[in-house]
Image (cartoon, grey):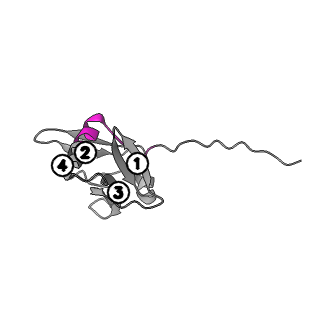
């Protein structure tokens, strides 16, 4: 008799989530670009003082294996390799002199003082 195994298939967690403030700011910046094909790409690249660096930029080129999520009308795209290092991360935004975008990554074991490099 064949053995049956139950497989639970569910949605993987978002590689990156956006706070309401960051989604509003990204939406505002995208609107200024006046190009509806653009989205926010969040990526991780080798380099920086701690081993990896974060990259965030507007992009219009989607790869078939990209992970796409929507936050209040803002499309956020992450490639699969970057997603492995970003799962559970949150993009925050704070207005003001010391403000700006900040990525909170629970997978980072060490970060650089600049805030854009981690290991």
- Label 4 to label 1: alpha-carbon separation: 33 Å
Which residue is labeled 2 in the image?
26
Q: Mark 1 or 2 closer to N-term?
A: 2
Circles 4 and 3 in contact, beta carbons < 8 Å: no
Of tags 4 and 1, the one toward the viewer is 4
Q: Residue at x 36, y 61 (%)?
A: 61
33 within the magenta span? no
Of tags 3 and 1, the one toward the viewer is 3
Which residue is labeled 3 in the image?
43
Where is residue 99 drawn, in percent x and y? 16, 41
Which residue is labeled 4 in the image?
32
Q: Residue at x 79, y 45 (%)?
A: 4
Number of other residues with Cα within 10 Å of mark 4, as a class: few under 14, some 14 to 19, many 20 or more = few
Question: Residue 107: which disc?
Answer: 1
Number of other residues with Cα within 10 Å of mark 1, as a class: few under 14, some 14 to 19, many 20 or more = some
Of tags 4 and 2, the one toward the viewer is 4
Number of other residues with Cα within 10 Å of mark 3, as a class: few under 14, some 14 to 19, many 20 or more = some
Q: Mark 4 or 1 closer to N-term?
A: 4
Q: Which residues are magenta?
A: 14-27
Judging depth in this view, the residue of 58 and 21 nearest the camera is 58
Report whether 9 appears left or right of 27: right
* 46 vs 38: above or below: below
Where is residue 64 drawn, in percent x and y? 47, 60
Circles 3 and 2 in contact, beta carbons < 8 Å: no
Q: Mark 4 or 3 closer to N-term?
A: 4
Q: Residue at x 18, y 49 (%)?
A: 32
Circles 3 and 1 in contact, beta carbons < 8 Å: no
Quick one: which residue is furthest to the top in this view?
Answer: 20
């Amino acid at each position: 008799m064949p053995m049956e195994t139950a497989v639970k298939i569910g949605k993987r967690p978002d590689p990156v989530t956006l706070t309401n403030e960051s989604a509003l700011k990204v939406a505002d910046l995208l609107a200024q670009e006046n190009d509806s094909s653009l989205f926010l790409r969040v990526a991780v690249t080798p380099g920086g003082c701690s081993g990896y660096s974060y990259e965030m930029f507007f992009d219009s080129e989607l790869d078939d294996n990209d992970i796409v999520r929507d936050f209040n009308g803002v499309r956020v795209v992450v490639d699969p390799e970057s997603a492995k290092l970003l799962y559970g991360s949150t993009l925050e935004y704070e207005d003001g002199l010391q403000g700006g975008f900040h990525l909170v990554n629970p997978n980072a074991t060490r970060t650089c003082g600049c805030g854009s490099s981690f290991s």
